[in-house]
Image (cartoon, rainbow, N blue to C red):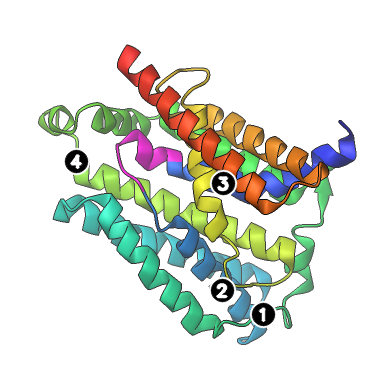
């Protein structure tokens, strides 16, 4: 229990917090996105290759990556919402497709040369003792909390999650709301990609695929606290920090990745069951 270790936990949880926070939005409407890890990897490859091979500056590369993330989210969301096909099926297929795109971009190589120094410093600069990725994750969480809890858009999303047919009869464009949810995930994946690649000062294979289960575990764990059975941003943030602290503790006690996987999987199952029980009671 030291400030140094706390900084390490928060910095390590920054990208995971962003992914979990944005995944909370479609979950509020009953949708899942299984492609978010591969989406993050593709966007990480994009932002790095723009600097390394195209000579772009950090700012332009980040902006383009955010736009591409929004476009991917728009395509996925529109396809899922208007085709009526299960989000599980579409995003699973999209994940395989995006994995191929990422390998096509990077050719399976780790890219670390040619990155802008200002981009690398993004993960190193500190404000009030914590690095910028921590504050970025906090800002993302605050924005999403406000949107989902204190805006017309958030109330419409909640209505869609409660009963899609009733929401449609009340004049809400259900397909558009669901699409917006996936757009938010796409932009969040871009933000997470920037955090991951700036912290590693490189882009490497499978940089984000291992974040999918911990992100969903954090979301479902969050649905078991504060407001049982209800997905919400602050609960998600608490769930992610809980998972990150456990991971940190296992690392400090020299447990291997196999033990961490067992523990994370067990927590995920417990979180889903607890969330389900909470929903039945409400």
Check if residue 31 falls in the magenta segment: yes
Distance from Cα at disc 1 to Cα at disc 3: 23 Å
Distance from Cα at disc 4 to Cα at disc 1: 43 Å
Picture coordinates of residue 50 (x, y %)?
A: 59, 79
Query: SS for tag 2?
Result: helix
* Residue for badge 3: 18
Above or below: residue 218 compared with residue 39: above
Q: Is residue 241 visible?
A: yes
Picture coordinates of residue 238 (x, y %)?
A: 60, 29
Estimate how packed mark 2 is, as few (under 14), some (14 to 19) or many (20 or more) residues with alpha carbons within 10 Å: many
Query: SS for tag 3?
Result: helix
Estimate how packed mark 3 is, as few (under 14), some (14 to 19) or many (20 or more) residues with alpha carbons within 10 Å: many
* Residue for badge 4: 173
* Residue for badge 2: 45
At x 65% / y 45%, what residue is drawn? 260
Indicate which disc, 1 or 3, sits on the residue closer to the N terminus. Answer: 3
> Which is more foreground, mark 3 or mark 4?
3
Estimate how packed mark 4 is, as few (under 14), some (14 to 19) or many (20 or more) residues with alpha carbons within 10 Å: some
The residue nearer to you, when weighing 179 against 226, is 226
């Amino acid at each position: 229990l030291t400030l140094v270790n706390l900084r390490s936990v928060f910095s390590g949880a920054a990208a995971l917090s962003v992914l979990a926070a944005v995944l909370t939005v479609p979950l509020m409407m009953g949708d899942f996105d299984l492609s978010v890890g591969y989406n993050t990897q593709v966007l990480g490859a994009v932002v790095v290759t723009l600097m390394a091979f195209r000579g772009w500056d950090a700012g332009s590369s980040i902006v383009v990556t955010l736009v591409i993330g929004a476009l991917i989210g728009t395509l996925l969301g529109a396809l899922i919402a208007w085709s009526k096909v299960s989000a599980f099926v579409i995003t699973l297929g999209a994940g395989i497709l995006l994995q191929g795109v990422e390998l096509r971009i990077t050719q399976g190589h780790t890219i670390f040369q040619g990155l802008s120094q200002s981009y690398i410093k993004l993960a190193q600069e500190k404000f009030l003792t914590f690095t910028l990725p921590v504050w970025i994750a906090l800002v993302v969480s605050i924005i999403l909390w406000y949107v989902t809890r204190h805006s017309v858009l958030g109330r419409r999303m909640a209505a869609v999650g409660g009963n899609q047919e009733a929401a449609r009869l009340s004049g809400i464009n259900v397909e558009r709301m669901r699409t917006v949810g996936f757009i938010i995930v796409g932009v969040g994946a871009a933000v997470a990609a920037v955090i991951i690649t700036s912290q590693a000062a490189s882009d490497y294979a499978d940089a984000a695929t291992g974040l999918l289960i911990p992100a969903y575990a954090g979301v479902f764990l969050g649905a078991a606290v504060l407001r049982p059975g209800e997905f919400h941003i602050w609960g998600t943030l608490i769930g992610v920090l809980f998972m990150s602290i456990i991971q940190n503790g296992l690392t400090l006690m020299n447990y291997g990745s196999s033990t961490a996987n067992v523990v994370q999987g067990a927590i995920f199952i417990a979180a889903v069951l607890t969330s389900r029980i909470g929903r039945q009671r409400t």
